[in-house]
């Protein structure tokens, strides 16, 4: 089974702190994604990566950056956390299947910024 | 931008009844997927239907796709309390370099009452 793990289930940070959210997958997937999920807004794509050291902006990249130094690890960075970044963050991975990519999700990190 | 929109937003049924959820989308797709999310957890892939398919089954799940109406439905037959979850449709778009990006709807929250 594909396993996607996230470093924390719950995280509480203060405004202005630098926050790192880590995601690791064990299936050698090329593609990795970061989403945030908010009530009434569904899942929104922040960033994704289709290869090591490659990154692409999603729909809401402002206030975030990412790092992918190794194939299995994709990090989301909040350079200076703000209260409007309080949310559930979901990481996912997928492999190229010629147009039928299924995404495998981690359990999520619920981040609260005070 | 939100591609898929699920309807209804919430659905409450008795155990043993069938549950039907609908998804509408705006632009042409390669395939459409349905995911399930238990409260506070990550999403789990349920079923994928390609744009050239009209119906697909998997256990108690039945998915239909009408590309002329840009809509899909998910039917869960003989529902169980364990089916209580949020259900999301997701449509794909090619994002380059062998990667497909998924756009998720806001979800239907299903409650199955024992």
Image (cartoon, rainbow, N blue to C red):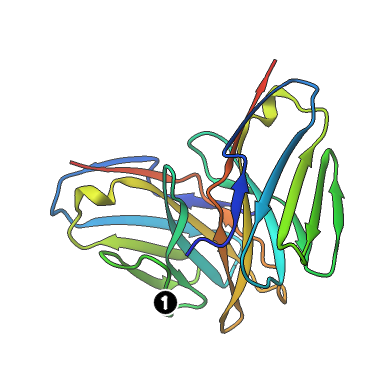
- Residue placed at 57% from the left, 39% from the top? B9
- Residue placed at 72% from the left, 66% from the top? B31
Estimate the x, y position of residue A73 in percent, counting from the top left. Answer: 45, 64
- The residue nearer to you, when weighing B31 against A33, is B31
- The residue nearer to you, when weighing A92 against B18, is B18
Residue ID for mark 1: A55
Q: Quadrant of residue A110?
A: top left
User: Is residue A53 shown to the viewer in this render?
Assistant: yes
Estimate the x, y position of residue B14 in percent, counting from the top left. Answer: 72, 19
Estimate the x, y position of residue A71 in percent, counting from the top left. Answer: 49, 71
Q: Chain of mark 1?
A: A
Say which element carries label 1. Answer: loop
A55 shown above or below A78 = below
B98 shown above or below A72 = below
Would you say B114 lies left or right of A3 here?
right
A8 shown above or below A36 = above
Q: Quadrant of residue A80?
A: bottom left
- Residue placed at 78% from the left, 68% from the top? B51
User: Is residue A1 shown to the viewer in this render?
Assistant: no
Q: Hey, which residue is sitting farthest left in the picture? A: A16
- Residue placed at 60% from the left, 73% from the top? B93
- The residue nearer to you, when weighing B98 against B102, is B102
Rendered-image quadrant of the C terminus of chain A: top left
Estimate the x, y position of residue B79 in percent, counting from the top left. Answer: 77, 28
Would you say A47 lies left or right of B3 here?
left
Q: Hey, which residue is sitting farthest front in the picture? A: B69
């Amino acid at each position: 089974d594909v396993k996607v793990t996230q470093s924390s289930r719950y995280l509480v940070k203060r405004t202005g702190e630098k926050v790192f959210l880590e995601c690791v997958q064990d299936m050698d997937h090329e593609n990795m994604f970061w989403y945030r999920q908010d009530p009434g807004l569904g899942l929104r794509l922040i960033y994704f990566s289709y290869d090591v050291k490659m990154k692409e902006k999603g729909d809401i990249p402002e206030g975030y950056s990412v790092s992918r130094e190794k194939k299995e690890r994709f990090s989301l960075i909040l350079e200076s956390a703000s209260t409007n970044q309080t949310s559930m963050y979901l990481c996912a991975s997928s492999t190229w299947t010629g147009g039928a990519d299924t995404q495998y999700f981690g359990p999520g990190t619920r981040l609260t910024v005070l | 931008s939100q591609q898929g929109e699920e309807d209804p937003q919430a659905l409450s049924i008795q155990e043993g009844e069938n549950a039907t959820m609908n998804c509408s989308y705006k632009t042409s797709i390669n395939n459409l997927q349905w995911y399930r999310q238990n409260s506070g957890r990550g999403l789990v892939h349920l079923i994928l239907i390609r744009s050239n398919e009209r119906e697909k089954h998997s256990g108690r799940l039945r998915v239909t796709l009408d590309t002329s109406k840009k809509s899909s439905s998910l039917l869960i037959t003989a529902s169980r309390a364990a089916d209580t979850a949020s259900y999301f449709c997701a449509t794909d778009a090619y994002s380059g370099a062998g990667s497909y990006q998924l756009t998720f709807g806001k979800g239907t929250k299903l409650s199955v009452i024992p």
